[in-house]
Image: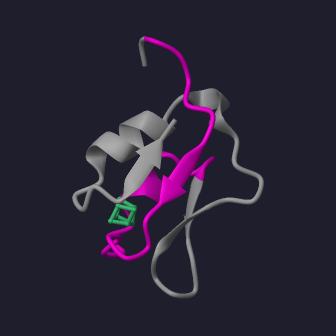
Amino acid sequence: MPGGIALRAVVDKDLCIGCGLCPEVCPDVFQMGDDDKAHVRDDADYSAGCAQEAADSCPAGAIAVE
Ligand code: SF4
């Protein structure tokens, strides 16, 4: 990703439709929870730089990265 690596990601659980895409795109940062919504991992590792890609791929626009 040009322009640097995201340092933080947030999932809006009201928007998340539980499609499972973000953990597939970026398993170091996202995981599916017991509520079938995506969660940011407690031990999220942003070094792979995939958080932005996951946000861009989310069909619900539920992921914000900064
Ligand atoms: Fe939810 Fe978006 Fe992740 Fe799909 S890609 S699980 S809608 S946050």
At horizontal 45% and vertical 12% (from top left) the residue drawn is 3
Q: Closest to the observer: 54 or 60?
A: 60
Q: In which quarter of the image is ligand 1?
A: bottom left
Horizontal side of 18 relative to 29 (left or right) equals left
From the top left corner, tell me how far across and down residue 43 is, in percent. 77, 53
Q: Is residue 56 left or right of residue 10?
A: left
- Left or right of 52: which side holds 27? right
* Quadrant in which residue 21 is drawn: bottom left
Tell me if 25 is positioned left or right of 29 in this view: left
The N terminus lies in quadrant: top left
What is the span of residues highlighted in magenta in the rendered image?
Answer: 3-29
Is 13 located above or below residue 61 in the figure? below
Residue 61 sits inside the magenta stretch: no
**Which residue is situated farthest in the bottom direction here?**
35
Q: Tell which residue pokes out farthest to the top in this image.
A: 3
| Percent coordinates x, y for residue 4 in the rendering | 53, 16
Which residue is at 49% across, 35% downward?
50
User: Quick one: 48 or 55, which is closer to the camera?
Assistant: 55
Q: In this view, does 15 lie above or below 63?
A: below
Toward the right, the furthest residue is: 43
Q: Is residue 15 magenta?
A: yes
Q: Where is residue 5 in the image (x, y as percent from the top left)?
A: 56, 23
Residue 25 in view here: no
Q: What main secondary structure does the magenta stretch of the protein show?
A: loop
Picture residue at 27% right of the left edge, 55% below the top:
61
